[in-house]
Image (tube, rainbow, N blue to C red):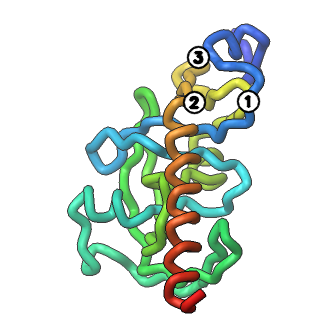
Amino acid sequence: MDIPLVLGFLDEDKARTIQPYDDALVVTLRIGGYDVRRVMVDQGSAANIMYPDLYKGLGLKPEHLTAYSSPLVSFEGRMVIPKGQIRLPVQAVTDVVEVDFIVVDVFSPYMTIMGRPWLHTLGAVSFTLHQKVKYPSGGQVLEIVGSQAAARHCLVAAIQHRLEAETSATANNGL
């Protein structure tokens, strides 16, 4: 008899988290054959986004990209024109799925953002409160655990970058 799997979160799932907090869910995944840290899981994102550090780190070149012409909106609310799109294997625990990444050339403290397309392909549920992603695989529920330390490191890097950009803009305007 098949027993349906339930993807849920219990108070025990918060056992290794620092409470209270409002950290992003940042995990490590195997992308294109490499372990990639600083992967933000964002169920609010309609796309999987790849940033310059990962693009260069994987040794990708413009000829590896396919055209992608729809503009995106950055966290700062600016319009971003993608460099293109690429499909790469992404391994979560033991499962590998092919993922389409939209490649952009803007600063991010994250290497990539994994959005709803990846979550839906895995059949996964993410929960920032518990700092976990859970998904069904082979009759069991597997989980990917987030790193609050990595999330906080990324937050600090984003704040520093913004302060440096504001200081540079002020200096360039002669103020």
The answer to whether the residues at label 3 and label 2 have Cβ atoms under 8 Å apart is no
What is the C-alpha distance between the residues marked 1 and 3? 29 Å
State the SS at label 1.
loop
Image location (x, y in percent) of residue 165: 53, 72
Residue at left offset 61%, top offset 13%: 16
Q: Is residue 172 above or below residue 89?
A: below
Q: Which residue is mark 3?
A: 140
Residue sitting at the far front: 175
The answer to whether the residues at label 2 and label 1 have Cβ atoms under 8 Å apart is yes
In terms of sequence position, does the residue under pointer 2 or pointer 1 come before the other? 1
In terms of sequence position, does the residue under pointer 3 or pointer 2 come before the other? 3
The answer to whether the residues at label 1 and label 3 have Cβ atoms under 8 Å apart is no
Q: Which residue is mark 1?
A: 21
Image location (x, y in percent) of residue 114: 55, 51
Residue at left offset 37%, top offset 50%: 89
What is the C-alpha distance between the residues marked 3 and 2? 26 Å
Q: Nearer the viewer, mark 3 or mark 2?
A: 2
Q: Which residue is mark 2?
A: 148
Circle 3: residue type:
Gln
Q: Quadrant of residue 56?
A: bottom left
Residue 96 seen in render:
no
Q: Nearer the viewer, mark 1 or mark 3?
A: 1
In terms of sequence position, does the residue under pointer 1 or pointer 3 come before the other? 1
For disc 2, the neighbor class at 10 Å (few under 14, some 14 to 19, many from 20) is many
Q: Is residue 162 above or below residue 13?
A: below
Q: Quadrant of residue 159?
A: bottom right
Image location (x, y in percent) of residue 69: 53, 87
Image location (x, y in percent) of residue 45: 67, 58
State the SS at label 3.
strand
Which image quadrant: the N terminus? top right
Circle 1: residue type:
Tyr
